[in-house]
Image (cartoon, coloured by chain):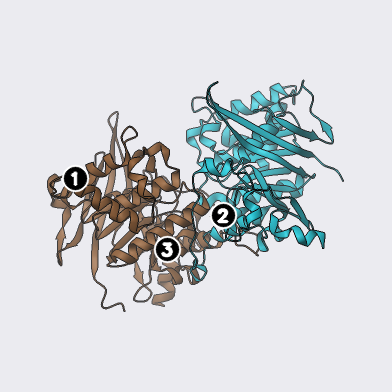
Amino acid sequence: MDKLLEANNLTKRFSQGNVISRAILTAVDNINFYIKPAEIFTLAGESGCGKTTTAKMILGFEEVTSGQLLRNGEPQTDKEKAWITEGVQAIFQDPFSTFNPMRRVDAYFHETVYNFKLAKTRKDAIDWIDQKLQLVGLTYQDVAGKYPSEFSGGQLQRISIARALLTDPKLIIADEPVSMVDASLRMSIVNLFKQLRDELGVSILYITHDLATAYYVSDRIAIMFRGKIVEMGSVEDVLMNPRHPYSKLLRDSIPQADPKLRWDSRVTLAELEHEEYSRKGCRFAGRCPEVMDICKTVVPPDVRIDDVFVHCHLYEELEEA
Amino acid sequence: MAESKQVVLRTEHLKSFYILDMQGTQKVVKAVNDVNLEIYENEVYSIAGESGCGKTTLLKTLFNEIVPPQRLVDGKLYYRINSEEVDVTTFSAEEKRRLRMEYISYIPQGSMSVFNPVIKIKGTYEDFIGSHVEVKNRDEIFAIARERIQELGLPKNVLDVYPHQLSGGMRQRVTIALASSLNPQIMIGDEPTTALDVVVQRGVIQMLKDIQKKLKNTIIMVTHDMGVHANIADRIGIMYAGKIVEEAPTEKIFDMPLHPYTQFLINSLPKFGDKTMRESVPGSPPSLADLPTGCPFHPRCPHVKDICREKMPETIKVDAEHKVACWLVEEEFNG
């Protein structure tokens, strides 16, 4: 099977403090996943679960502590530390801080065209840019000579997608691309991702905390909790029939836009974040409704049930049987 | 049930604009434009709308906190104080100050800026409560604070820490506990759960519901998340370009939205178990400084007619509880 991107035992540790007192925080702990061509893969989880750190490692903004990232089956070499190349492009959360407010938007397009030598003349460049802008429902006339403040958040996010498309990438890393966009305009961005996958065969690593749009748009999903992937599989399996207690909690906590589906159960909130990171066994043990003794001391294995990976002691016997 | 409801807050043709003087040319931002509300005792009223539709300005106006360049251009705002309806727009600064916390309190979105970062949480409590309650010493203030904090199930030692030691969700819950500590009649929340994670958001909503049940007071809340509305609100007002375009009990808004904008808002939401194509509201929201003529939604409306471009529709009552301002409904309704 073709794998566009593969992460093997990817780990990132941050150390805080000085020589005398040092705290080590494992932000991403031994995660494994892969992305196939023309698929939307979602990394979902709450803030502080390590999903953005994973994206930063893929993009080369953070060094990998241990483990490996393979692109098309080949490990990255020291020379190409930065992965933002023709093949991999990124879209970030806040469209207003993606663009310099004092700089015209079209300058970003011309700069990318120049850097990657995508066109010989200025006219070719404009044609090329116009073609990419049309994919997101805009034209070159709409952006020429304008500053970021002249656009709405949704428009700017579409402009940054068009800019990412300039190099014909195979993979787009989208880190919370809709969380700053108004709910009423969110679907236009999410639909665009579907369209890019279906029409251009672009793969998207969609990083989000919004499980409803994740279900709507993606093919496969991985749920992260405190640096670990706790459940991974197709969205239908993971979100419609969550197995890990944390996935269940997360899934049930999405406020449903239907007054008949109000919550009737109560929820316990996390203790201090730091404590959860430094737990010995399963990191969810402190809040898990189905906690067992073993969870507090032993790190759970990755159990495979059908095509879903679950990182939980509850399902251990199932696999052996 | 409708007849026994007591109105606690009422507005009449409320208009609040930002009037900006820019190098000789005047720019008027019509953020709250002719809003009529009747908010009852013991209910959660929530207001939905896109960013830049005037939601926050409306809340500030309802809180009776109008700071230039915002001005109250026209209209009246009544609170029901000691079973008497009072026009509070004429109140002096001292009278307004007395009403805050005791009668009406405010929960902001970013709880980081509520607490002074260099003093412990109890210092902030002392400032807030001490300026309203006549007490002999600080211990009495802390007794009030502790009682509420324990009732809401927050850790006891929360008063003795600094704001940065709390997580975002905990800070937001402490802020809500503070806003409720003098048992106000009305609590106003400006996107109180927006910056939070889903599980934490659920905890905060749970707490707001608990407080409302306990105090039997009114919560007026603004958020753009329709899921949150569905979970907490008794009635919902849909705001578009400074006006309330539709208002109804929660079930009615979700089951039978009448205004095309409300229909878009609800139909664009993705649901679990349903992957059919969802469409956003077309176009982008209008600038409040340069509103289109007629109905402000007409440039984005798929059912637009000639009359929509010329005249703003009146708000009509479809039934006792369901109000909508749209020409389509008006025609259907009046034959």
Pick the residue in front: B124 or A179.
Answer: B124
Share a chain, discs 1 and 2? yes
What x and y, as percent, mark residue B103? 21, 56
Work out whether residue A129 can be spotted.
no
Determine the colour of chain B.
brown
Residue density around tag 2, few if under 14, some if 14–19, many if 20 or more, within 10 Å: many
Which is in the foreground here, disc 1 or disc 2?
A: 1
Q: Which residue is mark 2?
A: B280
Determine the colour of chain A.
cyan
Q: Where is A52 relative to B84, above or below?
A: above
Q: Please, what is the three-letter code of the amino acid marked with disc 3?
A: Ile
Q: CA distance from mark 1 to mark 3?
A: 32 Å
Q: CA distance from mark 1 to mark 2?
A: 48 Å
Q: Which residue is mark 3?
A: B232
- Image quarter for residue B161? top left
- Image quarter for residue B279? bottom right
What x and y, as percent, mark residue B32? 31, 51
Residue drawn at the location 51% of the way across and 30% of the way down: A147
Pick the residue in front: A283 or A208.
Answer: A283
Residue drawn at the location 53% of the way across and 22% of the way down: A20
Q: How many marks?
A: 3
Sequence-first disc among 1 and 3: 1
Chain letter for the residue marked with disc 2 in the picture = B
Q: Please, what is the three-letter code of the amino acid marked with disc 1?
A: Gly
Q: Please, what is the three-letter code of the amino acid marked with disc 2?
A: Ser
Q: Which residue is mark 1?
A: B130
Sequence-first disc among 2 and 3: 3
Pick the residue in front: B318 or B77.
Answer: B77
Sequence-first disc among 1 and 2: 1
